Structures are given as structure tokens and as C-alpha cells.
Amino acid sequence: MRILGIESSCDETAAAVVEDGAAVVSSVVASQLSTHGPYGGVVPELASREHLRAIVPVVRAALERAGTDFTGLAAVAATAGPGLVGSLLVGLTYAKSLAFARGLPLIAVNHIEGHIHAVLLEAKREGLPVRFPALALVVSGGHTHLFEVSERFDYRLLGKTRDDAAGEAFDKVAKLLGFSYPGGPVIDLLAPHGNPRAVRFTPAKMKGNTLDFSFSGLKTAVLRWVEARGMREEIDARRRLLKTTPHPGTEQWLEATPPATLDLLASFQRTVVDELLRRATAAAEQIEANAMIVSGGVACNTGLRAAAREARLPCPVYFPSPGLSTDNAAMIAAAAFPKYERGEFSGLDARAQANLTLALQ
Ligand code: KG4
Ligand code: ZN
């Protein structure tokens, strides 16, 4: 039973064919990094235009690599939100037109649910099915959420960021220091070269729901640190490096980054990782979780993976492989599978919703 998944919520145009919610038959991701990189963030208008260019060839490639045409599909699934509305519209509208033209059921999927299913998909494939209730930490450029996930895939929101998402904090700190976009991978690369205990950041204290996150204070603390040291020349040198070398390697970054800045990066990453794991652990204990799922772009972070392995967590923890951590369409097709089994189809009036929520608190 094969589902075609389509994802276009942010800056990746992706399509994938997934069988029985477990086997990724094909997965194609067209990244727009080179378009947005020079701007240090995603430019919504450019994203929509790039999706329009990529959607037809990306879907065609996913079908070709799966060795199938539309007759081999049981349904078409697409991300309906949350995300950039112009971007979402491209994928969802294309999915609707395919469903209509080929007489296939349409399944609208929440992007965050997709991230959770990226982990469930791999666990199922490897014969290590996740036990429920599970605690899901979805941590990306747009989201930092803790959910309770039931066996029926009902979701309860336990905590979320009150300001920046964790990935956004990585991106903003990297940008402020003159590193490339997205900032997560470059900080991850350089953090092991610094001392994670060198700079002390005060952890955010949350009034009200103690499972909520806040990263804007940390970002401001980094800004203050930078201002106090007058790092203009160093930052400009990295910006110049980026102009001549759009993708510097580790050696080039290290040459352009003095030890004190490496210490700052290491300490920043450690603080984010500690905050994420501290609250995820508390949430897992609160719901007596049998599994912890970490997903979204920041789940690629090697510091987070290492800390989760070393921490005394109350239950087993699951991370997706890096290719399934960042935005992709296999996770959308996988999330659609239980909906297909339950006959939860969407009409052709399904709407793209920038602020679509997965669950209420
Ligand atoms: O899931 P994703 O591809 O898109 C969203 O739904 O936002 O996540 C992208 C985010 C970016 O903020 C990026 O900096 C972050 O994930 N990211 C990382 C790493 N790789 C990607 N953050 C920390 N460490 C990484 N290795
Ligand atoms: Zn995402």
C-alpha cells in the first residue's frame, strides 16, 4: 500500500513514496539553501517561487525512483500546515490536483505530526516499534514542542517555546557571529572545538508551565557577550569568507574563528541541549512515557544526540537518521498511513494553514 507524500511548508520541496507507513521506497528533497543562504534566512516570496519551479520535477523523480506511476498509489498526502502559507499552497494545491485527476484520496497532514512519524517510521522498519505513551520533542527552525503521543496518535501539547524555536536560536546566533545559514549545522560542527563550560548562561526560568521553553534570553546573552568583546573585525572576516566561499569546510571555519568564539559556540550549544533534555525528561516523567522521540532539524545535533545517550532518561530515546530529521516528504507519507487505514481523508477544500496546531494544551 503506497502513499505519495508531498512536503513544501518551508524551504524544501520534497516528495516521497512510502509503503505501509514503514518502507521508504523513494524520497526526493530539493533544497532551496542556495537561494536563501545569502539572506541569512528564508525569504517567503522566493520560497514560493522555488516551490513552483521544483514541485513537478520533484514529484516526477519520486515516482520514477519508486518505479511506479499513479496507478500504483493508494493515496496522495500533503502538508497542510504549519508553515509559510505561500509555500504550503504550492504542495497542497498540486496534491489536490493529482488526487482529483487520478481519482486518489487526499490526506492533509500536519507538518509536526510528520516529524514525529519520521521516528516511528524508522523504528517500525527496524523492528523496534516505539511503545506508548511516548513523549515527543519536536525541535526545528519553526517549532520547539513537547507532546504526549498515544497509541492511536492522539496528541496532547505539554509545553512549547514562548519565543524563538531552538533551531531559530541556532540560526540567529550563527548569523550574528557571521556564520552561514542555517546556523545549526555550522555551530554543531564547531562546538566540539570549544569548551562547553567556558561561558555561563543562566537557564531560562519559566513562570507558569515549567515545561515551556524560552530561547530569546539566551540569544540576547550571546549578543551582549559579543558586544562586550568588540568582535566586529572577526565577524566581518567570516562574512568576507562567505562571500568568496559559500560553503566553507571545518578547517576554513576554524581558521576564521578564535578559541574564545569556539568556547562561546560550545557553551551556547550545551545550554540549548541542557534546556531541551531537562524539560523533555521532566515531561517524560510526568506522563510516565515508555519512549522518548526527538525529531525535527535540531535532532541532527550531535551534541544533543550524545547528551541524550549519556543522560539517565526515564525511557528509551529514539532519533531519526539525519536525512529524516530535517524536512522531507517520507515523514508526511508515513503520517498519512494511519489516517488512510482509518479512512480519514480530506476534501478538495482542504486549506493551507500557516498556524495549524497539532494539539491543544
Ligand atoms: O525541520 P527543519 O528542516 O525545518 C523546520 O521545520 O524548521 O529544521 C531546520 C532547523 C534550522 O533551524 C537548522 O539550523 C536546524 O534545524 N538544524 C540544526 C542542525 N541541523 C539543522 N540545529 C542544530 N544542529 C544541527 N546539526
Ligand atoms: Zn520541519
Image: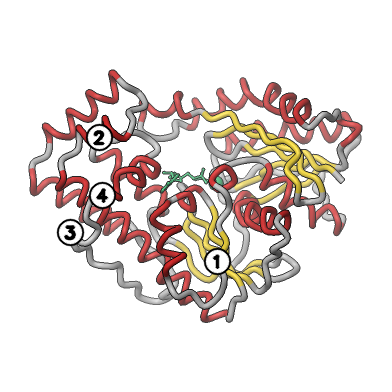
> x, y (%) of residue 289?
59, 76
Q: Mark 3 highlights which residue?
A: 198
Q: Amino acid at mark 1?
A: Val
**Residue 348 against residue 128 in the figure, above or below:** above
Q: Nearer the viewer, residue 102 or 258?
A: 258
Q: Going 46% across and 51% down the picture, which residue do you hit?
A: 298
Q: In the picture, residue 98 is in which quadrant?
A: top right
Element type at mark 1:
strand
Q: Are marks 4 and 1 in contact (CB under 8 Å)?
A: no
Q: Mark 4 highlights which residue?
A: 265
> x, y (%) of residue 16?
71, 37
Q: Going 42% across and 71% down the picture, which residue do you hit?
A: 311
Q: Which mark is residue 317?
A: 1
Label 2, label 1: how far apart the Cα atoms are: 34 Å
Q: Nearer the viewer, residue 55 or 162?
A: 55
Whichever of labels 3 and 1 marks the residue nearer the N terminus, that label is 3
Q: Mark 2 highlights which residue?
A: 178
Q: Amino acid at mark 3?
A: Ala
**Residue 122 against residue 201 in the figure, above or below:** above
